[in-house]
């Protein structure tokens, strides 16, 4: 195991943000959203979280509440087993960010298992995001994400 490392410091300004997490990777995203809410940020925020099921999703209600504080925020939840009923912002299966329309000047922040972050990063690069605009925090073993 390694100590957490990465670069999840928010850029100054009002550029749009894309926050993607899986499992316990939700933790830094919650603090980011809480900070943005406390500062009355008007940023456009797209939040994607992946988990096994709603029952396994730590801080699910807190995430719903924080995203609800932003007039220009969208939430996309991806569960392996979503249960019934499935709401419009809940999707079954793995996180697929290729279906999201992201603005050109978006800054992306990722936190979760290495395979999740590598998949999301690859999808973001395929959508035209620059590697310099994709930031991540790692809580675990051996992750190779080239900048």
Image (cartoon, rainbow, N blue to C red):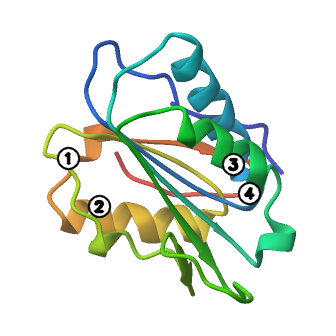
The residue under the point 55% across, 41% down is: 68
Quarter location, residue 127? bottom left
Mark 3 or 4, nearer chain start: 3
What residue did someone put label 1 on? 130
Mark 2 or 4, nearer chain start: 2
Label 1, label 2: how far apart the Cα atoms are: 8 Å
The residue under the point 45% across, 55% down is: 145
Q: Is residue 115 left or right of residue 19?
A: right
Percent from the top left, x then y, of residue 101?
21, 61
- SS under mark 4: loop
Label 1, label 4: how far apart the Cα atoms are: 25 Å
- Label 3 CA crowd tier, 10 Å (few <14, some 14–19, many 20+): many
Q: Nearer the viewer, mark 1 or mark 3?
A: 3
Q: Is residue 107 left or right of residue 127?
A: right
Q: Are marks 1 and 2 in contact (CB under 8 Å)?
A: no
- SS under mark 1: loop
What residue did someone put label 4 on? 141
What residue did someone put label 3 on? 26
Label 2, label 3: how far apart the Cα atoms are: 19 Å
Mark 1 or 2, nearer chain start: 2
Mark 1 or 3, nearer chain start: 3
- Label 2 CA crowd tier, 10 Å (few <14, some 14–19, many 20+): many
The residue under the point 58% across, 28% down is: 32
What residue did someone put label 2 on? 124
């Amino acid at each position: 195991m390694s100590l957490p490392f990465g670069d999840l410091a928010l850029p100054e300004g009002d550029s749009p943000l894309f926050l993607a997490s899986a499992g316990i990777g939700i933790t830094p995203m919650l603090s980011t959203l809480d900070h943005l809410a406390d500062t009355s940020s008007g940023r456009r925020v797209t939040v994607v979280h992946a988990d096994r099921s709603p029952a396994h999703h730590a801080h699910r209600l807190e995430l719903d509440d924080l995203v609800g504080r932003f007039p220009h925020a969208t939430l996309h939840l991806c569960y392996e087993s979503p249960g019934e009923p499935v709401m419009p912002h809940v999707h079954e299966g793995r996180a697929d960010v290729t279906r999201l329309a992201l603005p050109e000047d978006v800054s992306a922040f990722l936190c979760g298992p290495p395979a999740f972050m590598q998949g999301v990063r690859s999808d973001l690069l395929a959508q035209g995001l620059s590697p310099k605009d994709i930031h991540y925090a790692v809580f675990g073993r051996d992750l190779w994400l080239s900048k």
